[in-house]
Amino acid sequence: MGFFSKSSDALQVGLSTTKAAWTQRLRKAVLGRSSINQDLLDELEEVLLTSDVGVPTTQKIMERLQQRVAKDKYLKISELDRLLYEEITTLVTKDAITASSPDGLRVVLVVGVNGAGKTTTIGKLAHQYSSQGKKVMLAAADTFRAAAVAQLRQWAERVSVPFVSLNEGSDPASVAYTAVERAQKEAVDVLFIDTAGRLHNNANLMQELAKIQRVVQKVIPEAPHEVLLVLDGGTGQNAFIQAKQFSQITNVTGLILTKLDGTAKGGVIIGITDALDVPIQYIGIGEQPEDLIPFDAKQFLDSLFTEA
């Protein structure tokens, strides 16, 4: 899958802060050294950890690097980028999970904690699908925050797609049920259902999310066809923790990492992609509708390692 309408230059700009921090740490680690030895490997481990790659993934990378250094005996510093690139690529390059493609309506449930950029992400997705000629509908199942409903309504108007909501305080599952029925009648291609921002450790709210899924299945047994988890990439390892816990409770089919522009914590992408079976589908690198781009592991790594 291509990077939507974004060029590689735009990706470089969007991830420039992460790249700058990554490059600075690597260059500092190799300063004054001529070969890759154990002291450098120890420094490199610290670089990976401070770049939010995460402990389990860092350990995997280090074990592989140590094996290669032991095998080849002497490796020049100039080879470090290539070795790192190759070992990280083996961990994060996976076959994408292809979501089912129903003949009719596709129902997409969007979940995540408060402040991750969930509603804005839905608006950007609506823009993308509409631009591809799909008929899109948005549903506001975050019924306890009037501001959330208003924000989603604004996005629906901005991208010219139909919008479904009920009275403030209504049962979120009722909104979802109403939206699915209406979407079927109006021959909608994709229905995005926004849910209340949930704390990943709040059992009651997680039960509410499960109820939404059960109610939707009364209309379309195989729905929702996708459950997208939106994570704030700028929170680093906290995003990783949320991804693990949501995946344990909910049948998450895809991840979206937002707010990666302006943060040095983009290394969390490496850890999440390695540790979870759930693929990253999109990354957000800006505020505009076009700034949500399909994720490609190789292009991400190229942007990280290639000299500007």
Image (cartoon, rainbow, N blue to C red):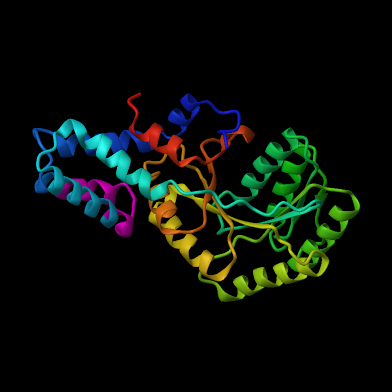
Q: Main secondary structure of the magenta part?
A: helix
Residue that extends furthest to the right in the rendered view of this protein: 185
Q: Is residue 182 visible?
A: yes
- Seen from the viewer's position, the closer of residues 129 and 169 is 129
Q: Is residue 215 left or right of residue 74?
A: right
Q: Residue 98, percent across and down?
A: 61, 51
**Quarter of the image where one finds residue 83:** top left
Q: Residue at x 72, y 68 (%)?
A: 212
Q: Is residue 267 visible?
A: no
Q: Is residue 254 left or right of residue 178?
A: left
Q: Residue at x 8, y 33 (%)?
A: 32
How many numbered marks, from 0 up?
0
- Seen from the viewer's position, the closer of residues 187 and 15 is 187
* Quadrant for the N terminus in the image: top right
- Seen from the viewer's position, the closer of residues 220 and 147 is 220
218 vs 307: above or below: below
Q: Residue 144, percent across and down?
A: 70, 63
- Seen from the viewer's position, the closer of residues 166 and 69 is 69
Q: Residue 5, percent across and down?
A: 60, 28
Residue 10: say if magenta.
no
Q: Residue at x 61, y 33 (%)?
A: 290
Residue 47: say if magenta.
yes
Q: Is residue 184 left or right of residue 15?
A: right
Q: Residue 216, percent across and down?
A: 77, 66
Magenta range? 41-58
* Quadrant for the C terminus in the image: top left
26 vs 146: above or below: above
**Quarter of the image where one finds residue 294:** top right
Q: Is residue 92 left or right of residue 307?
A: right
